[in-house]
Image (cartoon, rainbow, N blue to C red):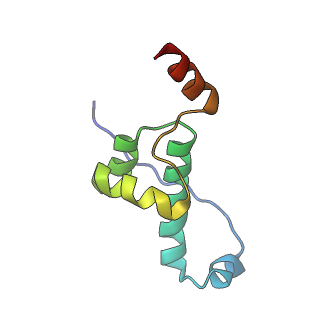
Amino acid sequence: MTATSENYTVSYPASLAWTLKMRKQEFEKEMRLLSIIKLFELGQISSGKAASLLGISKIEFTNMLGKYCVSYIQTTEDELIEDFQNA
């Protein structure tokens, strides 16, 4: 099976990029990055898939998560307690 690429358009006020002191292209790249990081954070995609979508290594992806205050370990408190109790 071959992966295909599709483009989606997201509308935002032109002033948003300006407010963030970003050029349009830089802003769009950042929004793409943030959406992929959020999908990872929500457990919708793996770190490997996220890295692949961004065209970077898995190590580079995991290293950048801290900049966005996202933990590489996606375990809930309840899961940690259960793991501890089962140890």
Residue at x 59%, y 25% (from the top left corner): 81
Q: Is residue 72 left or right of residue 53?
A: right
Residue at x 54%, y 58% (from the top left corner): 34
Q: Is residue 48 left or right of residue 33?
A: left
Residue 36, visible in the rendered structure: yes
Q: Is residue 1 left or right of residue 41?
A: left
Location of the N terminus by quadrant is top left
Position above or below: 57 against 23: above
Q: Residue furthest top?
A: 86
Residue at x 31%, y 49% (from the top left corner): 58
- Residue 64 placement: quadrant: bottom left
**How many numbered circles are shown?**
0
Depth check, front residue: 18 or 14: 18
Depth check, front residue: 2 or 21: 21
Q: Position of residue 75 (x, y in %)?
A: 54, 33
Q: Position of residue 21 (x, y in %)?
A: 60, 85
Q: Position of residue 31 (x, y in %)?
A: 55, 63
Depth check, front residue: 82 or 38: 82
Residue at x 40%, y 47% (from the top left corner): 50
Q: Position of residue 49 (x, y in %)?
A: 37, 42
Residue 54, visible in the rendered structure: no
